[in-house]
Image: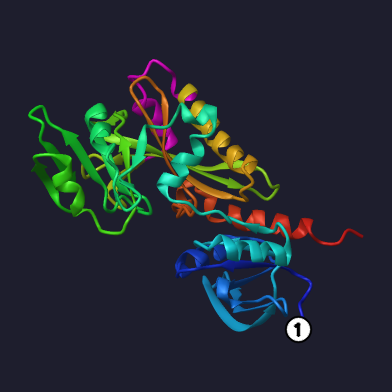
Amino acid sequence: MAARDSNVTIGIGVTYPRHDLIQARLLRYGSDDVDFIRFGPNDILFSSREVSGYKAKIDRVRGKVSWIWGMYPVPDVIYLDGRVEQEMVQRMVQLIGKNVFNSFTFDKLEGHELLRQDPLLSRHLPDACSVYAGEGLNPDVDHFLRRHREVYVKPADGASGKGVFVVRLGEDGQVHVSSFEQGEKAYPNLWEWLPKLKPGWPYIMQQSITTVRWYGLPTDIRLNMCKNGEGKWEEAFLMSRAALSGDYIRLNHYRMLLRRDFPDLFMRIKKSSEEIEAEILKVGHRICGFFDESGHHMADLGIDLGIDGSGKVWIFEVNPLPYPYTMAFGDMSLIRPLEYARFLARRSLPQH
């Protein structure tokens, strides 16, 4: 078995390359009593308690991280930064105990169904259903559209606003479908359009919520929540985004609105900006608490919300693998997962 040094070791389990993000995390992280090893789930040798991976050599002066391949003792903590099958997660837990986090990944529909189980959170969820039922289309989606008149159809595993459609039922009964990629088209009914969706992909149909406008542009709220170096959930970043290209937020097609902009954004709502912000954080902390109560070891959540004209907070989706925003705007979710991982590792050391 490979020898280990006196530092605690954090393993970063990756299933697809996000090396630029990992490098940014390590360069921003300030503690020197931690070794980092990057590896894939299939690189764990369970019998010898080793991993075949890459150890980080961090040069903060030059702003560079180099990686040294080798066989290393299994880490004290495993921070999952990618989707891993639950069977493999359970094997990791059996190997090192509960120091495996971000261990539950889910799509938009699974996240909606999970949050719907909580009485408080269910009041903040737009109506939603699956586009498919079994191997065919869900027969209820037509009734769903007629009830809400306007809906979003999203890939359940999608990200960054890609592949999202806005579907409206016209007064003439025609179905108007628009997307950033394809523009707008009209169909005589929903069944004429649905088969054109990407085959084999799960989709969610979600009630459209009219959110507050920023100079006529629809907005949403992004709240990043992380566990910190004391093991407690905290707000890592809060902002609003104004859509620059239509009815929904797309990657690199929005204007960022910081907290200082909230009084102007919410000025037409009877509630004060402080009241709305407090409600946003209350919902965010309840989501995090619900994941804890459900037995899922999460430490990093990106929550997309909306505020309607009455000031009500709506939960659009929860992202289990959020991509941090630049720390120039105060997004601490870049380093909080590493601080939490160190907390777990130090807590597990033998007490003398």
Residue 270 is covered by the magenta coloring = yes
Query: What is the number of callouts on the image?
Result: 1
Residue shown at the point (49%, 68%) measured from the top left: 15
**Stretch of the chain drawn in magenta:** 257-274
Q: Amino acid at mark 1?
A: Met
Q: Most extreme residue toward the right, as rendered?
A: 352
Residue 231 is covered by the magenta coloring = no
Q: Quadrant of the C terminus?
A: bottom right
Residue shown at the point (64%, 40%) measured from the top left: 293
Residue 112 is situated, as x and y percent measured from the top left of the image, at 44, 40
Q: How is the image coloured?
A: rainbow
The reply to whether residue 76 is in sight is no
| Residue marked by disc 1 | 1
Residue 131 is situated, as x and y percent measured from the top left of the image, at 30, 45
- Whether residue 189 sits left or right of residue 119 in the image: it is left
Instruction: Say which of 18 and 115 sits in front.
Output: 115
Q: Using the image, determine if residue 57 lies above or below residue 301.
A: below
